[in-house]
Image (spheres, helix red, strand yellow):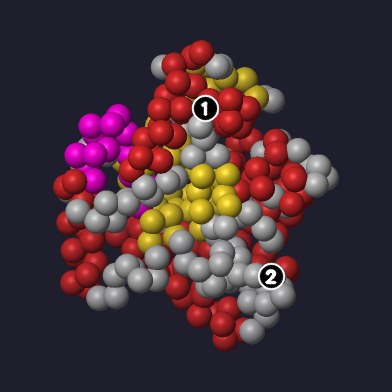
């Protein structure tokens, strides 16, 4: 299903691709599951526990990624409590080293899109320095670009990136691309308290969004699936108007919830709610 969409000055025909997370350890089973259920790709998440720590581990990962062909692969860095922009310069440089390693690994895997976070797993932003975070993210964007990678910042459920006005500043001042997590956006204090509308996350820079994470909402760090299209149709319609957001990750890691959400998204994409 391809449609011409208009958003501001942008006109583009886009066919959104549905992706699932790498929630099955055996990549042959993951590939089989994705193809059986109509997914176009895999959103591959790294955590500190499974990040390759040797050339042999990198080679094993390369073989696993290659075994997923012809599925498209994009990458997601879920590193809790590892933040660039740290007030502590030593910790800041340690975090930058980690993110540079992730960029180098994604380049080695021939990836071209990587989503990262700022403040993931933290209880507050007291350890972060705003201007240093801007400088460091700008540096990472350039580092990734030289390796052919589009670096995307994801909005979180709390903290700086949960606030539309500050999320916008990160994108504008650093040149970063973006990933919109519609579950995080729904529970953002700025949205819940009606200081901003959910669409304020995307209105300033609709052309910067490349990816979306789709589920209903996050409660106690758990992703809750939608029960019906009505739960998320306004947010899906918003995504559908974004000119470059062609990668929709059904971001649940339990099979029944993932397939329930996929069915909701498919119903929307069938055109009944557009």
**Left or right of 162 on screen, residue 257:** left
Residues tagged 2 and 1 counted as in contact (Cβ below 8 A): no
Residue sitting farthest toward the right: 195
**Left or right of 95 on screen, residue 122:** right
For the point 22% across and 42% down, the residue is: 31
* Vertical side of 186 occupied by 39: above or below: above
Mark 1, Cα crowd under 10 Å, few <14 / some 14-19 / many 20+, is some
For the point 44% across and 34% down, the residue is: 261
Question: Quick one: SS at disc 1?
Answer: loop
Give the quadrant of residue 104: bottom left
For the point 28% across and 31% down, the residue is: 37
Marker disc for residue 124: 2
Mark 2, Cα crowd under 10 Å, few <14 / some 14-19 / many 20+, is few
Q: Return the disc, 2 or 1, that comes first in the chain's sequence.
A: 2
Is residue 148 in sight in this rendering? no
Exactly how many numbered labels are in the figure? Answer: 2
Marker disc for residue 228: 1
* Vertical side of 116 occupied by 226: above or below: above
Question: Quick one: SS at disc 2?
Answer: loop
Image location (x, y in percent) of residue 45: 38, 56
Magenta span:
30-44
Image location (x, y in percent) of residue 134: 67, 64
Q: How far apart are marks 2 and 1 (CA)?
A: 34 Å
């Amino acid at each position: 299903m391809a449609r011409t969409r208009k958003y501001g000055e942008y006109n583009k025909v886009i066919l959104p691709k549905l992706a699932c997370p790498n929630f099955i350890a055996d990549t042959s089973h993951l590939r089989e599951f994705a193809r059986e259920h109509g997914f176009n790709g895999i959103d591959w998440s790294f955590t500190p526990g499974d990040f390759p720590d040797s050339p042999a581990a990198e080679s094993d990962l390369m073989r696993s990624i290659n075994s997923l062909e012809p599925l498209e692969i994009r990458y997601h860095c879920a590193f809790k409590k590892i933040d660039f922009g740290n007030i502590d310069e030593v910790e800041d440089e340690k975090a930058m080293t980690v993110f540079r390693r992730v960029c180098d690994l994604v380049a080695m895997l021939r990836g071209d899109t990587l989503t990262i976070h700022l403040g993931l797993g933290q209880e507050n932003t007291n350890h972060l320095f705003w201007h240093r975070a801007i400088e460091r993210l700008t540096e990472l964007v350039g580092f990734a670009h030289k390796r052919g990678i589009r670096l995307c910042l994801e909005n979180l459920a709390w903290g700086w990136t949960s606030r539309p006005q500050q999320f916008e500043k990160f994108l504008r001042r650093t040149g970063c691309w973006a990933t919109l997590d519609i579950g995080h956006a729904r529970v953002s204090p700025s949205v819940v308290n009606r200081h901003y509308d959910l669409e304020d996350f995307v209105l300033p820079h609709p052309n910067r969004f490349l990816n979306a994470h789709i589920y209903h909402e996050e409660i106690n760090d758990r992703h809750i699936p939608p029960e019906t299209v009505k739960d998320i149709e306004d947010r899906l319609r918003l995504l559908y108007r974004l000119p470059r957001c062609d990668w929709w990750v059904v971001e649940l890691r339990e099979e029944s919830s993932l397939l329930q959400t996929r069915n909701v998204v498919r119903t929307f994409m069938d055109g009944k709610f557009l």
